[in-house]
Structure formats: structure tokens, C-alpha cells
Amino acid sequence: MKEVLIISGKGGTGKTTVSAALADLASKSHALVLVDADVDAANLELLLEPTHEETFPFRSAHVAVIDQDLCIQCGICEEVCRFDAVRRDENDTFRIDPSYCEGCLACLHACPSDAIQKMQHQNGEWYRSKTTYGTLFHANLYPGEENSGKLVSQIKTDAREFAEAKDVHFLLIDGPPGIGCPVTAACTGADLAVIVTEPTMTGFHDMRRVKAVAEHFRIPTQLVINKCDLNLSVQQEMLKYAAEEKMHVAGMIPYDEAIMHAQAEGKPVTQSLREPYFDLFQDLWLAIEKAIYE
Amino acid sequence: MVITIASGKGGTGKTTVASNLAYVLAQTQKDAETWLIDCDVEAPNAALFLDPVYDSEQKVERLLPVIDQEACTACGVCVEICTYNALAVAGGKTLFFKELCHACGSCARNCPEGAISERPEEIGKLQKGMSGDLHFAHGALTIGFSSPPPVIRDLKKWVLDPSAETTTYFLDASPGTSCPVVETMRGSDFALLVTEPTPFGLHDLKLVAELNEKEFQLPSGIVINKSGRNDAIIESFAAQKGIPILMRIPLSREIAESYSAGKLLVETQPQYTQKFTNVIAQIRSLIQTKGAIQ
């Protein structure tokens, strides 16, 4: 199984555009399973027109709840909670604020009167869907919920199992922005991370941070510079950095409203773009294919 | 007054809006403090536009477990207790995965052999200082640790005084709608939602508006960035939800170029000073209206 992950650090650099284009191009020669790992702002579905085949509830989150009949008001839960989730009111009644509770259950284990239970609640759902490019695993973490990393792990595990069962050997993962837990979860098991960046001070800054994360997990990286002609001096610095880091530059995509408009059509840009832009994406895909199969 | 700038989708212009608003207010209102707090600790970028001079720094530390392999019997109690899958037993040893740890302390407290101790470890770093008349603070999550909320929490505790009535705080949030955004928005008076008129921008704007409705019910307003011929999709959502559109910034290569070089919009296009001033006036009045209704 080969796993290719698309990440960026900074949001809005073009991860999903690149992922959808790669899905379109790769699916012409490979059977694919696709994963949208940006579970709290999932956008790949807007480009791939999925038909839901199955919906699964995501119930990872639990919060601790105090049974007032059993509580002896000792305050140990308040002591052990490191997330300021235990509230004591003027009558020494203890309550857990679910919006602060991170579900570690330290209080449950520490409570001497077994007055604390865990309450599981559904904090999202995930889907297996059919698209013309391959089966897509995607999710919807309800707004404000935690455990996005666990949801990413969940859909990746299922995508892998599904791919193995169907004898599919290529997993393409559209990753989340940032470097937090969903990114960590998206990184595990990846054979290649494609970092999509833009030649802006902020894009460059965040690209270096996410590159360090990939290195932490020992994942080889390739670079795509989107809107590459927006700032030539930052572009030069990026290319210099990539050379120093021995990071192959797999693609350079210019700033052009034609590409932005192609994307607004709700399809992979490779379906409406003509030369020379189509070729840029095609070359990008060939570079990635070469990197993982050589 | 605490104003969170959020977007759901990354790259829509949160940092542009937050840094320009803060800069403009600090310049025009010298008798009160203005702060910009960059709460995107995974990809902190606002400093690139403001070049602050830092005068103090603080580490964010949390207690992480250290396993004494001599004393450990690989009984697996810690593995069972950890709700984040940060511990595993393999080959007669207990392994710890720092990337998944939330530093709750449960494993150390419940190890039957007393084989787990805790050691403070740096999970992030905070800095504060001045950029001209503007107070500035930000935090950076350490690479290899994946839980941003504690860094955001410490950052806000360090510099934000909720009782400071004349001070204005602008909080630049991370993309998405999960726990880091919740941590940033908590305690705010207003949510300024920055979007772009694309299917992605709209999709994620809906999610972040839903987050606000569900968790905070803050008065809110919309900024349409990269505004142009597709604004109608945002306008109809805004009308349906009764969220006012406070400003539009056109899709323009010139603006993108000045952004790429790390320049503030008001530096390269001074006419925006008045526009941002108007946004602040509208936010004030929306907060007051909401206060009056309650």
C-alpha cells in the first residue's frame, strides 16, 4: 500500500485543489482510495461529487459526569483535573463543565466514591462514498468538537482496510492545515508528504514548520509551490530552502484567475483546464508517481 | 472588548483582517490599549506583518510521563487508562507516544508499580511585545506535541485581562472549527467571520457560524475577502442568518502581492484605514445592540 499525504501548514494554499487534481489524474492509471483528513472543514467532497454509501456515527468523545447522589464532596476530582473542568458552587456541589472536559477521565479513576461516570456522546459522523475517482472516506466533525485526530485515525484505518479488501494499493489523503493532532494522525503511515505552499512570508514560515513535523515522523517530502509567481523573491528563497533540504520541487503553479475559476466549477481543475496548466498538474502527478514507485 | 477573527477555511484572510484592524485602532486610539493576540499557535503568522519588538517570553510547560522501564512490569494498566492512545505495551515494554499525550497525569497517578513519574516538558513558547503603539502577543506549539489548546489557554491567561474595559483585544484564530477555535473564541464579545466567495469559503463559513450559534451566541459579522462576481453565495447565507456583511476586500493580484511580502494592506493602500475604522465602529455598535437586547 502506498500512502500519499497532502499538507501545507498554512491554510488556503491549495491542498484540496491539488488533492482533487491528483485524484483525477491518478485514477486514470491506478485504483484509488481517497481520504479527506480535514475533518473539521471537509472540502474535498465539494469537488468530487460523492454519493454516500454508508454513514457511521463517530462517538469517540466522552465527558465525565458526577452522580450527585454518590458524590461525597471531597474535591479530589477538582485537584486531579488539569483542564479546569470541575466547578464547585457555593454549596460545595461539584459539577463538570463539558465544554472544558477533555475526556481524560483522570477524575473518574481518582474518585474515592465511584461517583463519576463517563458519558459518551456522538461528536461527528463519517462516510464511505463513491466517486468517479475511487471510494472516498470523509467525515464531519461537529463544530466545536474535540478528538479530530481520533476521527482522522478512524477514517484512515477504515480506508486502509477497505483498500486491502478491494486489492487497491494507493491511498491519497487530503490533509488538514496546521501541525496539531489531526495532522499528526494524518502523518502516521504516509510514504510521502506533498507540501503545498505559496510564495508568501506566511506560507514559507508555515511550510517550514510542517516540514519539521514530517521529518519528526521520518516521512519524505516533496514541494508544490502554488501561485508561484506571486512573489519572486520569496519563491527564490523557497527554492533555495528546498535545495538545502534536498526536497524535490514537484510542481510550480502560477497565480492565475483561470485556475481559481476552474476550481469554482466544483470539479477537479484538471477537468476544465487546458494547456499549459493541465500539463503542470500532469507533471506534478508524474513526479509523485515516480517518487513513490521508485 | 474581545474580538475573535475566525473563518473555518484557512487562507481566507483572517490574519490580514486581524492585523490591519489592530494596527489601525492602535494608531487612531492612543488613549487606550489595543492588542493583537495571534492564537493560531500551529501556524503563527501575524508577527510577519507587524514586526513586533519582543520584551518578554514565557515557556508553556505541561507534565508529561516518564516511564521507569526497570520498575515497569508491562501490566498495561496505563494503556487501558489513557484515553488518547498515547501508551502501548510491546515486547514487554511500555512505549510512550508524546505526540498523542494530553498531559492529564492519569497514567502516572494510576500505575500500580509507581513506575511512571512526570517531568515538565516544553510544549510551546509565548512572546509579547510592541509593534509601534500596538501590543502584540503570540504563541508557538512545539513541533512534536500536537495539542494546541493548552498553549492558547496559557497565552490568553498571560496577556488578556477580561476586566480591562477600555482595552481592545483582537484574537486571530486558527482555521477549522474544533477545539483550538473554541479555546480562542471562549470569553469573546464578538466573532468576526472572514470568508471568500467560493464553495469552500461558504461551506466553512456555515460551520464556523454554527459553532458560534451552538457554543457562544456571540454577535457576529462577515468580511468577504477576495470579493468579486460570486459574492451572492455569501450574501444569501448572510441574509438568511441575519449576519451583517461589514466589509469587502476585492480579489486582486496587487493585494495578494503585498500580502506575500508581509506588508499590511493599510501600508500599501492607505484608503483601507478608513474602511477598517468603519468595521471597528460597526463591531462596537453590534456589541452594544446585543447588550441592550439582553
Image (tube, grey):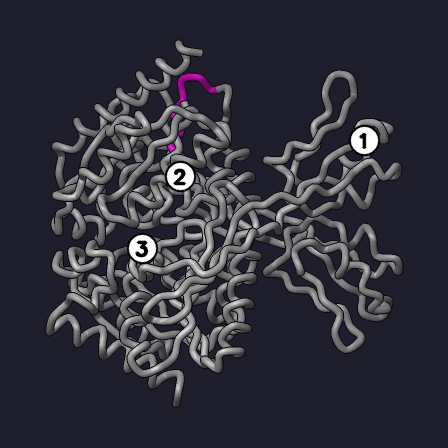
Left or right: A100 as drawn, with respect to A162: right
Disc ID at residue B208? 2
In space, the residues marked 1 and 2 are separated at their CA atoms by 36 Å
Residue B72 is one of the magenta-drawn residues: no
Same subunit, tags 1 and 2:
no
The x and y percentages for residue A86 are: 70, 32
Q: Residues within 10 Å of mark 3 (few under 14, many from 20)?
A: some
Give the number of callouts: 3
Question: Badge 1 is on which residue?
Answer: A75
**Magenta residue span:** B164-171
Q: Residues within 10 Å of mark 2 (few under 14, many from 20)?
A: many
Q: Nearer the viewer, mark 1 or mark 3?
A: 3
Disc ID at residue A131? none
| Residue lying at 49% horizontally and 75% vertically, measured from the top left | A163
User: Image quarter for residue A232?
Assistant: bottom left
The x and y percentages for residue B33 are: 38, 24
In space, the residues marked 2 and 3 are separated at their CA atoms by 17 Å
Residue type of the residue flagged with mark 1 = Gly
User: Image quarter for residue A53?
Assistant: bottom left
Same subunit, tags 2 and 3:
no
| Residue lying at 18% horizontally and 38% vertically, measured from the top left | B232
The x and y percentages for residue B187 are: 50, 28
Q: Check the image and name the residue furthest to the top.
A: B292
* Chain of the residue on which disc 3 is drawn: A
Question: Badge 3 is on which residue?
Answer: A46
